[in-house]
Image (cartoon, rainbow, N blue to C red):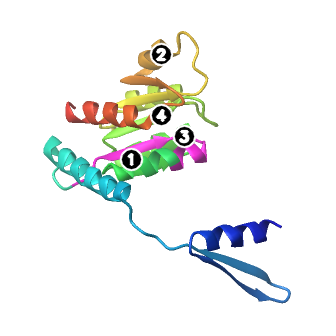
Amino acid sequence: MGLSLVKRLAHLHGGEVTVSSQVGEGSCFTVTIPYYPSQETEQFLETSTENYATLEASGFGTRSPKILIADDDEANVLTTSSYLEAKGYSVVVATNGWDAIAQALQEQPDMILMDIQMPELDGLEAIRRLRAEPNSINPPIIALTAFAMSGDEEKCLDAGADQYFAKPVQLKKLVNAIHQIISFS
């Protein structure tokens, strides 16, 4: 029944569903849907070009500012990284506090987005260790947490974060904060 619905939806959009199958190995279903650029797509592309120009004017030249996203939630990482890349940033990902420290030292990002609730080493301790690291370039850090409680902002700022946002954060608001911090650092 599911495949039948997929086939109908694909056909409604002018697409098709094909299958290739081998006995004992399984089947592969491919859904193909045509792409027709819309006015919204053109506006998005124009905005992206403006964002690149703004980043160039902020002192990065043709190099995209590098953002380290330290977050163990794959959906958050995918959403945030896609949005940041569309806005002209380059993205590096870490999935726990130890990985965040290692990636920060190796990649030397221009900004770190640090989730506070991570496995192995939480974001607060990762921030403290990065701030104490003598070999770090000390990039700005925005702390992000899903379980915001009173006093969390102060804890994050005391640990060494430059700014704090409770999740879910509006991506446009986050990018504005990133741009403002990077422009003045």
Q: What residue type is labelled 3?
A: Asp
Q: What element carries label 3?
A: loop
Of callouts 2 and 1, the N-terminal one? 1
Relative to 114, say whether 57 is above or below.
below
In magenta stretch: residue 50 = no
Within-10-Å neighbours for mark 3: few <14, some 14–19, many 20+: many
Q: What element carries label 2?
A: helix
Please name the residue that numbered disc 1 is placed on: 84
Question: Which callout, 1 or 3, points to the residue nearer the camera?
Answer: 1
Q: Which amino acid does label 2 sit on?
A: Glu
Between 86 and 3, the one lying in front of the other is 3
Q: Position of residue 168 (x, y in %)?
A: 54, 31
Q: Which amino acid does label 4 sit on?
A: Met
Q: Where is residue 46 in the image (x, y as percent from the top left)?
A: 26, 54
Relative to 154, say whether 82 is above or below.
below
Q: Which amino acid does label 1 sit on?
A: Leu
